[in-house]
Image (cartoon, helix red, strand yellow):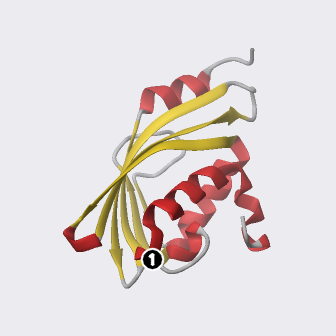
């Protein structure tokens, strides 16, 4: 990560780097949080304990990801497939993340699809789909 201000998010760095790379020159900024609009709507279309269905604003999103990084350390994000739509104002990305649940040492592997709407060269809206069962199984598994 290029900025020490984002050190608290190191556990999610592979995810942030994958997203930033997928968006390329459609957005301005070096880090994921640099390319997020102050009034972003980050919507997850799954119920997951501890994570709200809708996160409103960059500050709340940063707070949520700080918590994520306290529980999960990602070592990779890969298998990216990106689809552009609406003259580049919408980007759909499919990808996988891989890491470890810090409390138990259990392996964490998950698949995602995210629909990203860009306005004024920032992420204005994010709609996320994931394999909820994979996350649940990793988070509820006992240490090996």
Q: How many marks?
A: 1
Asked whether residue 134 is in view, the answer is yes
| Residue at the far left in the pictured view | 86
Residue at x-position 20% and y-position 69%? 86
Q: Quadrant of residue 71?
A: top right
Q: Position of residue 26 (x, y in %)?
A: 40, 75
Q: In which quadrant of the rendered image does the N terminus lie?
A: bottom right
- Residue 56 can be seen in this image: no
Residue nearest the viewer, comparing 121 with 6: 121
Q: Closest to the observer: 83 or 117? A: 83
Residue furthest bottom in the image: 120
**Vertical comparison of 14 with 123: above or below:** above
In the displayed structure, does residue 121 sit left or right of residue 140?
Answer: left
Q: Position of residue 37 (x, y in %)?
A: 46, 78
The residue at the point 41 percent across, 33 percent down is 131
Residue 46 x, y percent position in the rendering: 37, 41
| Position of residue 16 in the picture relative to residue 126 (left or right) | right
Seen in the picture, residue 132 relative to 84 is either above or below; the reply is: above
Residue at 59% across / 58% down in the picture?
A: 17
Sort mark 1 into few (<14), some (14-19) or many (20+) by Cα contacts within 10 Å: some
Residue 88: x %, y % from top left:
28, 71
Of 25 and 31, the residue lying toward us: 25
Q: Is residue 6 left or right of residue 92?
A: right
**Which residue is rendered at x = 72% and y = 48% of the image?**
70
- Residue at label 1? 27
In the rendered view of the protein, which quadrant contains the C terminus? Answer: top right
């Amino acid at each position: 990560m290029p900025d020490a201000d984002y050190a608290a998010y190191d556990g999610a760095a592979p995810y942030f780097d994958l997203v930033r790379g997928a968006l390329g020159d459609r957005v301005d900024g070096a880090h994921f949080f640099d390319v997020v609009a102050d009034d972003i709507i980050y919507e997850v279309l799954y119920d997951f304990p501890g994570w709200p269905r809708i996160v409103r604003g960059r500050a709340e999103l940063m707070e949520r990801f700080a918590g994520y990084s306290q529980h999960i350390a990602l070592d990779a994000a890969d298998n990216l497939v990106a689809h552009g739509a609406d003259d580049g104002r919408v980007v759909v990305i499919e990808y996988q993340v891989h890491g470890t649940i810090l409390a138990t040492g259990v392996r964490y592997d998950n698949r995602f699809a995210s629909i990203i709407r860009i306005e004024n060269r920032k992420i204005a809206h994010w709609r996320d789909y994931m394999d909820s069962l994979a996350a649940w199984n990793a988070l509820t598994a006992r240490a090996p």
